[in-house]
Amino acid sequence: MHNNLRRLVWTSGAAAVVQAHAIRSVGQEAVGVLLGVRKATSAVCLRNTAAGPTDFRVERAEWQRTENYAKRLNVNVVALYHSHPTGDLALSQADKAAITLSTVPWVVIAKVKGQWQARAFAFGSGEPIQLQIESARQCNSAISRITTLALKLETGMKTQPMIERQHQRFDHE
Ligand SMILES: [Zn+2]
């Protein structure tokens, strides 16, 4: 396997959007996608329509909108992310079954001992394999603007002031 496939790179801005989404998803898993070209430079929050608090489900139309949106931006869906409010970073049994159908790696985010942490997985032969996650600095404010725009356009979700502030902070790092 090529080295690039064993790791997942995300910018601090993309990571911040995912974390903010997980924080505000109370009683539910946060689910969304990471977009970019090779490395994840932005994140789009999706609607979780699962009934249970430890599951996620994204409607087909929402996937389609997200894929179309990525196409318009000339970026790829780099990974799917979801949070585990239970504080467990491991894939659940349901996750292990579902990731076999996924064409992109998965990122699981959870608060472990007071710290938000992430783990990435890809479907290998047999068991999912864990990927190394690397952080890259967000230095392109245009990409951040795309992230914020993505949140507004694609989810209908109100962009949280917190996220905007985080972007500004990362822009000027
Ligand atoms: Zn899960």
Image: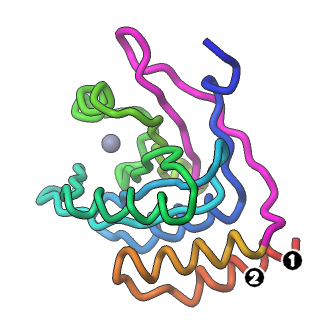
Identify the amino acid type marked 1. Answer: His
Q: Is residue 30 left or right of residue 159?
A: left
- At mark 1, the secondary structure is loop
Query: For the image shown, how many numbered marks are present on the structure?
Result: 2
Mark 2 neighbour class, 10 Å CA radius: few under 14, some 14 to 19, many 20 or more:
some
For the view shown, which residue lies furthest in the left direction? 51
The residue that mark 2 highlights is 168
User: Height in image: 143 above or below 40?
Assistant: below
Instruction: Name which residue lies at 42% across and 80% down.
Output: 153
| Most common SS among magenta residues | strand
Q: Position of residue 6 (x, y in %)?
A: 62, 23
Tell whether position 6 is magenta: no
Magenta span: 116-140
Tell me the number on the disc at residue 54: none
Q: Is residue 87 left or right of residue 156?
A: right
Does residue 86 sit above or below 149 in this rendering? above
Residue depicted at x 61% and y 74%: 146
Mark 1 nearby-residue class (10 Å; few <14, some 14–19, many ≥20):
few
Is 123 covered by the magenta stretch?
yes
Locate residue 93, reporting x and y percent: 24, 28
Q: Which residue is mark 1?
A: 172
* Contact between labelled residues 1 and 2, with CB atoms less than 8 Å apart: yes
Nearest the viewer among 102 and 91 is 102
Q: Position of residue 118 (x, y in %)?
A: 56, 45
Amino acid type at circle 2 is Gln
Assess mark 2: CB under 8 A from ligand 1?
no
Instruction: Look at 63% across and 37% down and name the residue there.
Output: 8
